[in-house]
Image: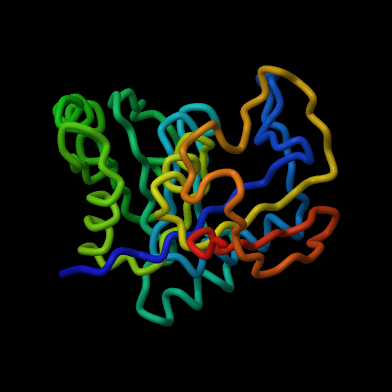
Amino acid sequence: MATRPYVLLSAAVSVDGRLDDASAERLVLSGRPDLDRVDGERAAADAVLVGARTLRGDDPRLLVTSAQRRARRVAAGRPAHPLKVTVSGSGALSPHLAFWHCGDAKLVCTVDAALPRVRRTLGGLADVVSTGPTLDWPALLAELGRRGVARLLVEGGGTVHTQLLALDLADELHLAVAPLLVGQPGAPPFLSPAAYPGGPAARMRLLEARPVGDVVLLRYAPKERT
């Protein structure tokens, strides 16, 4: 039986816990040193995942930008870029997004009802699988394990982070806290209300806290709660 991948959640947030502001323009939270750190995490991953809302809103390329890191992956017998994965319950995915037209292999995980729509819309741009009648995260992770993914980097958005933490499926959390206060009611939060394991008093183990440029990186072990 395939082993589920190690799941690393990565997010940059403001001091008041927002992933972005409420404007149409993307708010840049991380500085260059932290973006380079994230690039290193991508280079270490077998797959990088974002939710469909993040894909539609930001159209991230999710590439390893460092030529040296790409060369090291290739020298090790790996693709230059990790597998790119998105998750969509509705199947509303545009084939014109840059996500599909750069990098190496792509995978869409959806549900039974949306499967025909996604395959029809994307054609041969990505492999498409269903996790069943509803989005089943354990089944999704098992599918990635069968595809040889040992380390999965999850880069958002808030709905995906919330679901994985609530289901106790995240092995590690990297939170880069930027010295900004968004203060806008429509700005997307890092996490939404959910029944998190252990309840409000359960404390995750802190693995590391260090400055990276002008942000502070906090690394937690979500499954290790007291």
Q: State how the image is colored.
A: rainbow
Task: Judge whether 7 appears above or below 197 on screen.
Answer: below
In the rendered picture of this protein, how many numbered marks are placed on residues?
Answer: 0
Task: Judge whether 69 appears above or below 12 on screen.
Answer: below
Q: Position of residue 96 (x, y in %)?
A: 39, 29
Residue at the image position 25 percent from the left and 32 percent from the top: 122
Q: Position of residue 225 (x, y in %)?
A: 54, 61
> Toward the viewer: 35 or 65?
35
Residue at the image position 60 percent from the left and 59 percent from the top: 204
Looking at the rendered image, the quarter that the C terminus falls into is bottom right
Q: Position of residue 208 (x, y in %)?
A: 70, 69
* Side of 58 where 49 appears, left or right: left
Tell which residue pokes out farthest to the bottom in this image.
76
Q: Position of residue 171 (x, y in %)?
A: 47, 62
* Side of 68 where 154 appears, left or right: left
Task: Judge whether 207 appears above or below 65 on screen.
Answer: below
Looking at the rendered image, the quarter that the N terminus falls into is bottom left
Rendering quarter of residue 128: top left
Residue at the image position 65 percent from the left and 36 percent from the top: 19
* Side of 60 where 108 appears, left or right: left
